[in-house]
Amino acid sequence: MVADQIWTLTLQPQGWTCDTVDALSLLEAALLEGMRIPNSCRNGTCRTCMCQMLSGEISYQIEWPGLSLEEKQDGWILPCVAQACSDVVLDVPAAVNLFSEEN
Ligand code: FES
């Protein structure tokens, strides 16, 4: 069995990081580390989690995530149905760190 590739997910502007693997969506990986990206449906339709990818490569776990071609070209992604194919940096100013006492 081949071990999952481990990538680093970074949330900006906070600079928070966590590991992520193929089996997890970017949203799931962030939540496991207490980094709460705004979310609702978690199936790629409501667009609550929509954010911009500053760098990295992703693939989608569903065929038609709820984004227009223009939005995709502008770097918008849906992290609830996206998995990393490289280290990924997302711009999520509204993210909250559930493990931090400052929130
Ligand atoms: S949480 Fe609904 S599209 Fe991501």
Image (cartoon, rainbow, N blue to C red):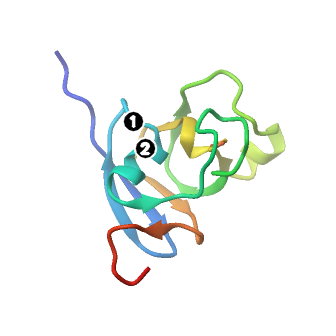
Question: How packed is label 1: few (under 14 Cα within 10 Å), some, or many (20 or more)?
Answer: some
- What's under tag 2, amino acid-wise? Glu
> Going 46% across and 38% down the picture, which residue do you hit?
25
Q: Are marks 2 and 1 in contact (CB under 8 Å)?
A: yes
User: Farthest residue toward the bottom?
Assistant: 102
Residue 3 lies in quadrant: top left
- For residue 56, above or below residue 37: above
Image coordinates of residue 61 in percent, x first then y, are: 54, 26
Q: Which residue is mark 1?
A: 24
Q: Is mark 2 within 8 Å of ligand 1?
A: no
Image coordinates of residue 72 in percent, x first then y, are: 73, 43
The tag on residue 11 is none
CA distance for labels 2 and 1: 6 Å
Tag 2's secondary structure?
helix
Residue 102 lies in quadrant: bottom left
> Going 41% across and 53% down the picture, which residue do you hit?
30
Query: What count of labels does the image hold?
Result: 2
> Going 33% across and 37% down the picture, which residue do you hit?
21
Is 20 on the left or on the right of 60, as rendered?
left
Image coordinates of residue 43 in percent, x first then y, are: 61, 32
